[in-house]
Amino acid sequence: MFEIRKYTPDQKEEWNKFVDKAKNATFLFDRNYMDYHSDRFDDFSLMFYKKNKLYALLPAHKIEDTLYSHFGLTYGGLIMDIHVNITSTCMLFTELNEYLRTIGFKKVIYRPIPWIYCKHASEEDLYAIFWKCHAHLLTRNIGTTIFMNEHMRWRKDHIRRLKKAVLNGVEVVANASLDEFWKILNDNLKQRFNAKPVHTLEEMKLLKSIFPNNIIQYNAYKDGNIIGGITFYMMRNVIHGQYSSTNSIGKDLGAMEAIYDKVMYHDYPDYQYLDFGSSTEDNCSVINEGLISHKEGYGGRGVVYDTYEWEL
């Protein structure tokens, strides 16, 4: 039923056009985003054709005899348009498994797209990998998401810090300087975790230049000096906080609260979800209770990010 082709750069335009109209894709699947770190991954993305028409995409890479979907992104999974149905999806995974076995793969590690990022119901793949691939859950991560239209009341400590930000004249600026923020972010991560951001400043500036409407930097200032910031990824219906950090002054004066108030209640009140991302350590098995409690204080609640595995 399906013709399966390994993606090549000459198919970039066709790939991106499908991503644009897909029912469950975000700009992370645009090849201009995926390929910024192509040197780190051995790309093995696949394109599925039915009657010579592109039917679905699978962003993926390989390590030895395992196919990963996709560990260079927060999530991977089968990208589908509105015409995909469950019967064909089951056949697709059956034929995918045979294709992968034939060329020497032994295992698949699969990260489906969380439902909050989908424009329409899009869990045909979850049914198919259970029944046709005998997949089992390998890892379950927990993220924190605000249903913005529900307007849940913030916890008292967040309200108190927001009031303090207002009283102290904290200014929030959209499309602000990445350079200024990255110094705070780097210093904070190094001091607290001896870590670095996943993206370098140069990579993030490149991505923002390619996706100016999808990557928005918000910074908070006191007397003209930066005290904190958040890098937001803007999807169709989700605002995702990719990076956030403050200095000691920003923490005291409510820089984060000031930014979230402006984003949630002034600049983007019609978005459905604000995704804070995960708050776990040790391969998702340990909850950072302080961090997740901070996020829940804004009204966020749990959405899982799953990873599945099956043998070929």
Image (cartoon, rainbow, N blue to C red):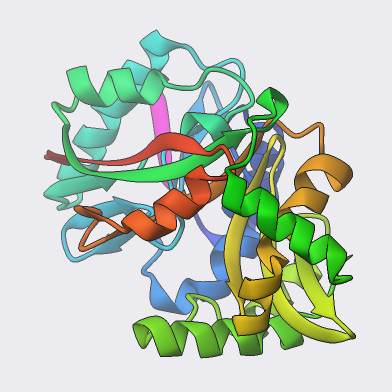
Please give the count of numbered marks on the rendered protein: 0
- Observer-nearest residue: 71 or 115? 115
| Residue 198 belongs to magenta span | no
Quadrant position of residue 203: bottom right
Determine whether, in the image, residue 169 is placed left or right of residue 158.
right
Determine whether, in the image, residue 280 is placed left or right of residue 200.
left
Quadrant position of residue 264: top right
Residue drawn where x is 53% and y is 45% of the image: 297
Residue drawn where x is 82% and y is 36% of the image: 269
- Observer-nearest residue: 127 or 217? 217
Q: Percent from the top left, x then y, of residue 100?
A: 22, 44
**Up-down relation of residue 120 to residue 116 (above or below):** above
Chief SS of the magenta region: strand
Q: Percent from the top left, x then y, of residue 300?
A: 53, 39
Residue interval drawn in magenta: 1-6
Q: Percent from the top left, x then y, of residue 27?
A: 66, 50
- Observer-nearest residue: 198 or 281? 281
Determine whether, in the image, residue 23 is placed left or right of residue 278.
right
**Up-down relation of residue 137 to residue 216 (above or below):** above
**Up-down relation of residue 130 to residue 44 (above or below):** above
Residue drawn where x is 13% and y is 26% of the image: 134
**Up-down relation of residue 115 to residue 194 (above or below):** above
Q: Quadrant of the C terminus?
A: top left
| Residue 5 belongs to magenta span | yes
- Observer-nearest residue: 106 or 306? 306
Q: Quadrant of the N terminus?
A: top left
Residue drawn where x is 43% and y is 46% of the image: 76
Determine whether, in the image, residue 248 is placed left or right of residue 234.
left
Tell me if I can see residue 278 in this picture: no
Q: Percent from the top left, x then y, of residue 105?
A: 17, 51
